[in-house]
Amino acid sequence: PPGPLPSGTALNVTAKNIAFDPDALEVPANAPFGITFTNDDPAGVSHDIDIRDANGTVVASQDPIDGGTSQNYTYQPLEPGTYTFFCSIHSNMTGTLTVK
C-alpha cells in the first residue's frame, strides 16, 4: 500500500497513455505537500513525478513506480514560482506546478 501523505496539501495525479492527468497543479509556498500518484499504464511501463525549477534544476526526485500501481510521494516546501513536474523516464510527460 502507498505510504502516508504529509499533513497539508495532498493532490492526485494519474499517468495514463504516457501523459499526466491533470497536467497543472497548484500548492501553497513554503509548505510540504504530497501527491497520490496512480500509474494506470500497463505493467512494465514505469513513471515518476520529479520537479524542476525555472532554471531547469531538479529540485525533487522520486522513485519510479510500475504500471498498475500507486504511490504516495512527499515533497519538501518550495519557494513561490512556476515549476515543471515531469516523468524522468518519458521526457514528453510534463506539467506545470504553480507554487503560491
Image (tube, rainbow, N blue to C red):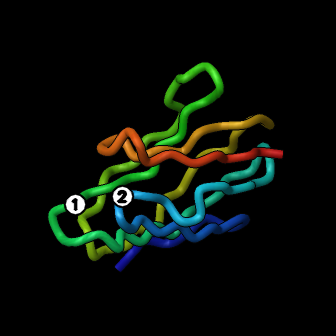
1 or 2: mark nearer the eye: 2
Residue 96, position in %: x, y? 64, 46
Would you place residue 15 above or below residue 2 in this image?
Answer: above
Nearest the eye: 33 or 26: 26
Q: Tell whether 94 sits left or right of 53.
A: left
- Say which label, 1 or 2, has the lower sequence index: 2
Residue at 71% x, 65% y is: 9
Instruction: Name the residue nearer the viewer: 13 or 79.
Output: 13
* Residue 79 lies in quadrant: top right
On screen, residue 61 versus residue 59, left or right, reads: left
Q: Work out whether 45 lies above or below 59.
A: below
Residue type at the position of mark 1: Val
The N terminus sits in image quarter: bottom left
Q: Which mark is residue 45?
A: 1
Q: Residues within 10 Å of mark 1 (few under 14, many from 20)?
A: some
> Please, which residue is most extreme toward the left here?
44
Single out the residue that lies furthest toward the right.
100
- Kindly identify the amino acid type of the residue bearing the numbered disc 2: Ile
Are the two marked residues, 1 and 2, in contact with CB atoms closer than 8 angstroms? yes
